[in-house]
Image: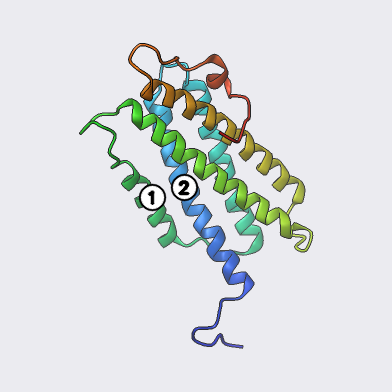
Amino acid sequence: MARRHGAPPDAGQMLAIYLNDHLAGSSGGLSLIRRIARGHRDTPLEASLTSLAREIAEDRDSLREIMRVLGIPRRRVRAVLGALAERAGRLKLNGRLVSRSPLSDVLEFEAMRLGVEAKGALWSALRSVADADPRLDRGALERLLDRARHQAGVLEDLRLAAAARAFEPSGTAPRPTAQAAAGGRGRTGP
C-alpha cells in the first residue's frame, strides 16, 4: 500500500533515517577524533587518543554491519552532510584567529563526548528492540554500549583536564594526568 502524502513513515523508514543519521554523525566524529589525535602527537595524550580513534572506527564499522544485516542502505547525502558539519565545527571562536588555543581542546573533547553519548543512546535504542528482532545481537549491543560508556568517561577526564589548563590562572593548571592519558576512570558524568 502506498504511503499517503503527509502520512508518517513506517517503522522501517524511521529506523533507516535514524541509523543513517547516526552513521553520518559517526563519520564526522571519527574525522574529529583523528584530527585531535594528530594534534596531540608526541604528548602524553597520544596513546589514549589513538586508541579512542581506533575504537570509534570499529564502532562505525559495527553500525555499518548492523545496517547491512537489517537491509538498510547507506544514504550518501547524509554522510556528506555529516562531513560538512565536522568541518564547520572547526570554525569555532577559540580566542585565536588561525591557531589552536587551550579552548580548542575543551570544545573538541566536549563535542566528542556528546557524540559518544549519542552513540551510546543508539546502542541502547537498538538493544531495546533486539528481543523483537532476531537480526540484532543483544550481547554485541551490550558490549558496544559498555564501550561507549567507557569512551565517554575517558573523554570527560580529558575535557576536565583541558578545562583546567584553559581556565585556571597561568601556571596553576595541572598537566594531563597519566590516568587521563591511559584511559581515565570510565566516569560518564561531570
Count of numbered marks = 2
Residue at x 47%, y 16% (from the top left corner): 44
Which element carries disc 2, helix, strand or loop? Answer: helix
Give the residue furthest to the left: 97
Disc 2 residue crowd, few under 14, some 14–19, many 20+, Cα 10 Å: some
Q: Residue 79, located in which quarter of the rendered image?
A: bottom left
Depicted 5 relative to depicted 189: above or below: below
Q: Earlier in the sequence, mark 1 or mark 2?
A: 2
Q: Position of residue 116 (x, y in %)?
A: 54, 42
Which element carries disc 1, helix, strand or loop? Answer: helix
Q: Position of residue 69 (x, y in %)?
A: 66, 59
Q: Is residue 60 left or right of residue 168?
A: right
Residue at x 63%, y 25% (from the top left corner): 185
The three-letter amino acid code for the residue at tag 2 is: Ser
Depicted 180 relative to depicted 128: above or below: above
- Can you identify the residue that label 2 sits on? 27
Q: Position of residue 123 (x, y in %)?
A: 65, 50
- Nearer to me, 171 or 181: 171
Position of the C terminus, as image quadrant, is top right
Depicted 140 relative to depicted 71: above or below: above
Q: Position of residue 150 (x, y in %)?
A: 63, 33
C-beta proximity under 8 Å, tags 1 and 2: yes
